[in-house]
């Protein structure tokens, strides 16, 4: 019977192996993601130059004679390049378009660009100005799409107000509740074909417990992000909202993964109002990865100053203070370690000096000893007779050594004979291999002839017939059995002596070895791994394992000694 304790032990080991493998795989994947982000961050100046080139191309078009509608469109293109890159420059084109829309009598366009102005004011932290400007919006003249933009802008403004208020709980809750109301209003006006549809839906579902609809939104958003190039504003927002959904579910690995995706997209589009990298800096601070965290937050701080974003600068400064404090604490620890190292070095230097002095005195003693040795050598010259006696005794020893040498010659002859036997067995193996190669060549020629003759059905019949494989496998087993028993002719008898009388293996007529004996024949040859034995015998590892376990249970010796005992069975045929 099988031992349930062994199964439990193997199951625990297997689970530990799987767990360790998953943890290692996740850590490796996470480090690769951070390395990818570091690489993108290193090339951030390249992305800035590309953006500046694109802006310069658009500016050149301003010198051309343009109609008001064309100017309106060109200003929008410049705004799209600037609105997360440089708020002041973006504001110039916003005000310009408000004037053009007013001159054209396009109230819908005028209101649309007032909403862009509110967005820029909020992005810069000018929250009071943004609220006042929002009052100038006439929602009766807004289209359905602009109605979504209206509520989305209010959501953006009040989310910044929540960040700005900080720990003032009453106001924070009030603004947060307003933000939620605006989201439900915005939902009425957004359609599935809108670029921000799934990220908006994710912002709704992140506030509620998990649901089938929320999981569906998350899955669709994940498919979109995983297939994206991470090079647009939409990619950055989608990745960020997906990260927040994973965060609310407690999935920290995916939270960090998609924050990295969002940061990569933000850096590529030169977004200086970058939230994802700021959050990553805080996570790295908590994980005590201070150097990388400080690199990220420094980039965020520089970007926020260039944008400029006053609210973001305050939040970033808080994280920077924590990282700087961590730097100071680490420096103190390093200084303490350095001080201890200096003390240790000083002590070792003193010990070294003492050692040098001791060596010097030892050399002086050695010099005196040499003088005494010279005196002893002179005394040895007076003992020539004793040396002659020693030479006679040495002659006797040489005679004994000669006898030993004769015995060694006999042993060497035996070894030569053993080597000759090994060479003969190797010849057996090469002969088998040669036969298989010859058969394969004949098989190839046969297939080739049939192909040339167009006998496709014969080829199909020939290749689908497993009888030949079974026959070759049977012949292979028989050759292996014969060669093995030629080397260890008493193996079967010796193996049966390890088993209980009623469990002794009885071979069928014509059998040299059976599967059970063949498995342990390989063990005798030094192959103990069940996977390798299974490959050799063309059977499953489970079959090998079950046979070995079953045989050990039949043994008259302790199970833990059985394998080692089998390795010493069978006297080699000379």
Image: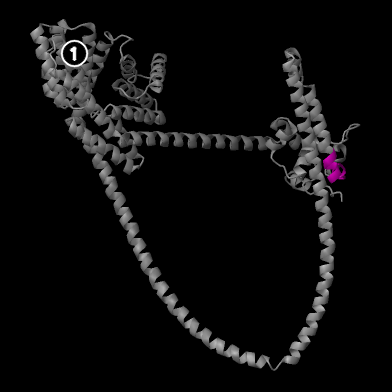
Above or below 339: residue 195: above
Label 1 CA crowd tier, 10 Å (few <14, some 14–19, many 20+): few
| Total numbered labels | 1
In the displayed orientation, state which residue is furthest to the front: 452
Decide if residue 531 is on the left or right side of residue 119.
right
Which percent across, then down, holds residue 195? 31, 14
Above or below 148: residue 311: below
Would residue 491 be counted in the magenta stretch? Answer: yes
Which percent across, then down, holds residue 109? 15, 10
Label 1 sits on residue: 73
Task: Please tell me in which quadrant of the rendered image residue 32 appears.
Answer: top left
Task: Please tell me in which quadrant of the rendered image residue 206 appears.
Answer: top left
Would residue 252 be counted in the magenta stretch? Answer: no
Q: Is residue 358 visible?
A: yes
Above or below 279: residue 357: below
Q: Is residue 168 visible?
A: no
Which percent across, then down, holds residue 200? 30, 16
Residue segment shown in magenta: 482-493
Q: Main secondary structure of the magenta part?
A: helix
Task: Please tell me in which quadrant of the rendered image residue 454 appears.
Answer: top right
Please state which of residues 30 and 182 is positioned toward the viewer in this rendering.
30
């Amino acid at each position: 019977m099988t031992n349930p304790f062994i199964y439990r032990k193997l199951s625990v080991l297997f689970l530990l192996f799987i767990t360790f493998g998953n943890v290692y795989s996740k850590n490796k994947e996470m480090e690769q993601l951070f390395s990818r982000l570091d690489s993108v961050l290193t090339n951030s100046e390249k992305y800035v130059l590309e953006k500046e080139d694109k802006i310069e191309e658009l500016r050149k078009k301003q010198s051309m004679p343009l109609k008001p509608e064309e100017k309106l469109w060109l200003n929008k293109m410049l705004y799209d390049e600037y609105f997360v890159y440089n708020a002041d420059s973006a504001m110039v084109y916003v005000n310009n378009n408000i004037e053009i829309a007013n001159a054209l009598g396009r109230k819908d366009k005028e209101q649309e660009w007032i909403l862009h102005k509110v967005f820029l004011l909020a992005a810069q932290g000018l929250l009071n100005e943004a609220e006042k400007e929002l009052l100038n919006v006439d929602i009766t003249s807004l289209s359905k799409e602009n109605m979504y933009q209206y509520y989305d802008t209010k959501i953006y403004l009040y989310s910044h107000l929540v960040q700005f208020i900080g720990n003032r709980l009453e106001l924070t809750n009030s603004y947060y509740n307003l933000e939620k109301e605006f989201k439900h209003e915005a939902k009425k006006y957004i359609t599935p074909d809108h670029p921000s549809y799934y990220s908006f839906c994710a912002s709704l579902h992140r506030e509620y417990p998990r649901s089938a609809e929320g999981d569906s939104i998350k899955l669709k958003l994940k498919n979109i992000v995983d297939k994206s190039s991470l090079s647009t504003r939409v990619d950055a927002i989608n990745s960020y909202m997906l990260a927040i959904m994973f965060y609310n579910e407690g999935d920290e690995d995916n939270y960090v993964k998609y924050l990295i995706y969002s940061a990569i997209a933000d850096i590529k589009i030169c977004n200086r109002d970058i939230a994802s990298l700021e959050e990553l800096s805080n996570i790295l601070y908590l994980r005590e990865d201070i150097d990388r965290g400080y690199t990220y937050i420094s980039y965020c701080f520089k970007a926020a100053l260039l944008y400029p974003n006053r609210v973001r600068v305050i939040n970033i400064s808080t994280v920077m203070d924590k990282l700087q404090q961590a730097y100071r604490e680490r420096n103190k620890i390093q200084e303490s370690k350095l001080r201890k190292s200096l003390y240790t070095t000083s002590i070792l230097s003193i010990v070294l000096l003492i050692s040098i002095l001791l060596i010097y005195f030892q050399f002086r003693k050695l010099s005196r000893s040499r003088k005494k040795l010279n005196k002893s050598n002179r005394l040895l010259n007076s003992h020539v007779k004793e040396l002659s006696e020693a030479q006679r005794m040495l002659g006797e020893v040489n005679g004994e050594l000669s006898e030993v040498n004769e015995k060694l010659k006999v042993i060497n002859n035996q070894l030569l004979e053993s080597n000759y036997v090994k060479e003969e067995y190797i010849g057996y193996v090469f002969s088998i291999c040669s036969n298989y190669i010859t058969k394969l060549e004949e098989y190839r020629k046969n297939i080739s002839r049939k192909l040339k003759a167009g006998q496709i059905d014969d080829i199909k019949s020939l290749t689908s017939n497993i009888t030949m494989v079974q026959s070759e496998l049977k012949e292979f087993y028989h050759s292996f059995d014969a060669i093995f028993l030629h080397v260890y002719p008493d193996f079967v008898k010796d193996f049966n002596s390890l088993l209980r009388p009623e469990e002794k293996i009885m071979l069928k007529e014509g059998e040299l070895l059976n599967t059970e004996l063949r498995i342990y024949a390989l063990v005798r040859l030094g192959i103990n791994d069940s996977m390798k034995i299974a490959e050799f015998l063309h059977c499953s590892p489970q079959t090998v394992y079950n046979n070995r376990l079953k045989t050990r249970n039949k043994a008259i010796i302790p199970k833990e000694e059985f394998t080692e005992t089998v390795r010493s069975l069978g006297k080699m045929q000379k």
